[in-house]
Amino acid sequence: MDLNSSVAASRLVAQQRAMEVTANNLANANTPGFKLQRMQFSDWLSRQRGEGVPPGGRTIAYTQDRATWRDQQAGALSQTGNTFDLALPGDGYFTVSTPRGPRLTRDGRFGPMPDGTLTDTAANPVLDTTGQPIRLPPDALGVTVSPDGTLSSAATGPLGRIGVVQPNDPARMRPEGATLLDATGPTAPVAAPAIVQGALEASNVQPVLELTKMMNDAREFQFVSQFLQAESDRQQSAIDKILPANG
């Protein structure tokens, strides 16, 4: 593959990744607590050495898929009226226990299991401020959740306090599925989480904007693909002309 094709191919691979990220955003437009993602591109510079390198040709810039970053803007809150639907209008994450260890989430669709353990939609236990699963007694009726996360029942009084944490380095978080995040580092408790009971945080994806971006990504991909095809045709034409001349 010649130099022009190699540079264009690097752009094609990066553009394909951008389309995948945008498609994932669209797929999770209705997922509670989902944060849209964006690609960060950069140049990967190849230093050319040798006396025969022409002026201006000593550095070749390839397109590099540098990183994926997450838009932390909060989504809109929607009232559900469900006792164990919880939303975080500000900073912070709920913590749930998974087979892979504690994970963070903004998806507050919680509910009690038959044994009273409060879990998310995947049956992962919700953790309290001490890192232990929250269990509700059978006689806990009319449960309320205060803004600081304290669960109470008129019949039994305080039942525990939901833990809300913030990672020390949010940029290092790794997504696991649509709603879970691996902090990959230490976290700190949020002093005043301002939890809203009976509500859910919607995704911060704006479908119309993402659809427009998807169309732009597709046009970019098509343009680079056409360039590569034209370059391939040009090389094949040159080969066809050279071979008969040397035959």
Image (tube, rainbow, N blue to C red):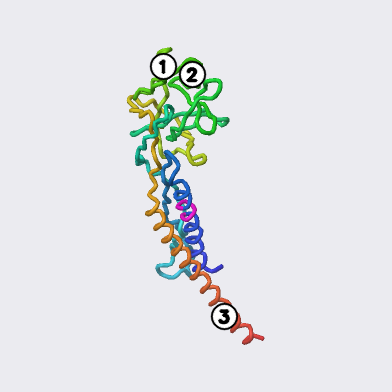
User: Which amino acid type is shown beneath numbered disc 1?
Assistant: Ser
Measure the C-alpha gap from mark 2 to mark 3. 75 Å
Q: Residue 237: which numbered mark, if any?
A: 3
Q: Left of 94 or right of it: where is 242?
A: right
- Which residues fall within the magenta stretch? 18-22
User: Which amino acid type is shown beneath numbered disc 3?
Assistant: Ser
Q: Is residue 143 above or below residue 88?
A: above
Question: Residue shown at 50%/57% (left/top)?
Answer: 16
Q: x and y percent of residue 159 in the render?
A: 43, 16
Measure the C-alpha gap from mark 2 to mark 1. 10 Å
Crowd rating for badge 1 (residues with CA inside 10 Å; few <14, some 14–19, many 20+): some
Of labels 1 and 3, the one closer to you: 1
| SS assignment at label 3 | helix
Q: Is residue 29 above or below residue 234?
A: above
Question: Residue shown at 47%/36% (left/top)?
Answer: 181
Would you name the residue on which mark 1 appears? Answer: 153
Question: Residue shown at 54%/30% (left/top)?
Answer: 123
Please tell me which residue lies in front, 171 or 208. 208
